[in-house]
Amino acid sequence: MAKGRGNRHQGKRSSTVVLVLSMLLMLTIVLLLLLGLGILSLPIGFNEDSLPIGDRIRLKRLTIDIKNEGEEGFGERREQWTEVLSWEPRAFLYHNFLSKEECEYLINLARPYMVKSTVVDSKTGKSKDSRVRTSSGMFLRRERDKVIRDIEKRIADFTFIPVEHGEGLQVLHYEVGQKYEPHYDYFLDEFNTKNGGQRIATVLMYLSDVEEGGETIFPAAKGNFSSAPNLSECGKRGLAVKPKMGDALLFWSMRPDASLDASSLHGGCPVIKGNKWSSTKWLHVGEYKV
């Protein structure tokens, strides 16, 4: 009888060991996924006690707060953290990516040169006017000045895509009633893929708050999304992101297997009240020559 009790105790201990090892294995897999997706990065070869308080990594609801050593910027940014919005498409929202001063700098730099926005003709690859897109906009040359270089470097750190793979920043302005119908950022023609190859990802930075409307909408996103408060009717038709000054939305137009992601279909809802200012950075598979 004593031997039978000993076997039972040994079986319980074995079960506990298996359970602990299984939990450690699951935790390792989750950490590897976060590292692989760029949501989490680990500093190498540093003394934690020597770091200033601002240099920290903190996870919260799959969010991260990181201040890179030596990073410079125009103005002071509030607390930064990244939120996973969707896996189909892969979409992430970086809160307080830009400072208020950086947002105002881009607006003031672009304002005198704004012209009616155009779209790409899928047959010729050239720009054309369209009722699909009713905003105004202009392009800022890549690495134009120090402020823009700092922002582009930050985008490269966020996306793990080199600065040289990006087009120049496009600044956009939407007044009341103006919109951008759902569309894809990737190309379906050969003309526009000659320079840098296909567009792989987009970073959309919100330069202003919008009182009502103006959401970025993903009507083909997969999953059940709870309705955020104060969305317009347009914003209720899929995964919606409300414009907030300083936030940056990253979404991928291509899947990890290099196929085009149809769930990346997106649009800009009509502005109902206020003005919407934003800046777009399109990123390519290869180097984009300017």
Image: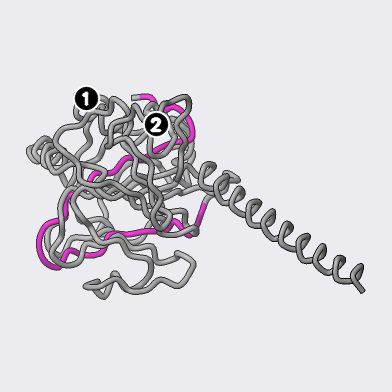
Image quadrant occupied by the C terminus: top left
The local crowd at label 1, few if under 14, some if 14 to 19, many if 20 or more residues have their Cα within 10 Å, is: few
The total number of labels drawn is 2
Q: Quick check: is 45 in the magenta stretch?
A: no
Q: Which amino acid does label 1 sit on?
A: Arg
Please provide percent x and percent y for residue 149. 26, 27
Vertical arrangement, residue 239 with respect to residue 41, above or below: below
Closer to the camera: disc 2 or disc 1? 2
Quadrant position of residue 105: top left
> Looking at the image, which is closer to me, 174 or 107?
107
Tell me if 18 is positioned left or right of 199 in this view.
right
Name the residue rendered at 85%, 71% in the picture. Answer: 5
**Distance in Å between CA atoms under marks 2 and 1:** 36 Å
Mark positioned earlier in the residue sequence (2 or 1): 2
Name the residue rendered at 49%, 59% in the picture. Answer: 88
Image quadrant occupied by the N terminus: bottom right
Tell me if 255 is positioned left or right of 82 in this view.
right
* Mark 2, residue position: 48
The local crowd at label 2, few if under 14, some if 14 to 19, many if 20 or more residues have their Cα within 10 Å, is: few
Task: Give the magenta range.
Answer: 261-289
Q: What residue type is labelled 2?
A: Glu
SS state under label 2: helix
> Looking at the image, which is closer to me, 275 or 113?
275
Quadrant position of residue 154: top left
